[in-house]
Image (cartoon, helix red, strand yellow):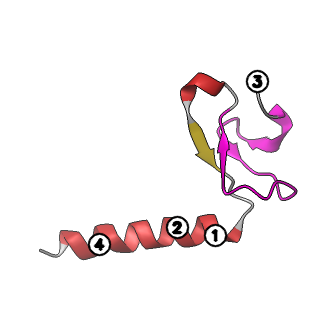
Amino acid sequence: MTTNPDKYKWGIFYFNPEDMRVIAPKQIQWMGWTLNFARPAVWLIIFAFIALIFYISRF
């Protein structure tokens, strides 16, 4: 494991306000990357992604 499991909410959402990274490695490194939901930038990314999906679906 590359990160502390106590920093995960419900075992899947990485939430660490002390970590400045927006994208962090998952608990099991070969599984890829995850977002740090404690960072405000992540919520902007998610909102922009959802807005893009709604915009594209209108066509």
Q: Of label 2 and label 3, which has the lower sequence position?
A: 3
Of pointers 4 and 2, the one earlier in the residue sequence: 2
Query: In the picture, residue 18 is in which quadrant?
Result: bottom right
Q: Within 10 angstroms of label 4, few (less than 14), some, or many (20 or more) residues? A: few
* Residues shaded magenta: 4-26
- The reply to whether dot 1 and dot 2 touch (C-beta < 8 Å) is yes
Amino acid bearing label 3: Met
Q: Nearer the viewer, residue 35 or 21?
A: 21
Q: Give the residue at x 52% y 67%.
A: 45
Q: Which residue is mark 1?
A: 41
Q: Which amino acid type is shown beneath numbered disc 4? A: Phe
Q: Which residue is mark 4?
A: 54
Q: Is residue 54 left or right of residue 9?
A: left
Task: Mark 4 vs mark 3: give the one in front.
Answer: 3
As drawn, is 49 to the left or to the right of 54? Answer: right
Q: Secondary structure at mark 1?
A: helix
Q: CA distance from mark 2 to mark 3?
A: 26 Å
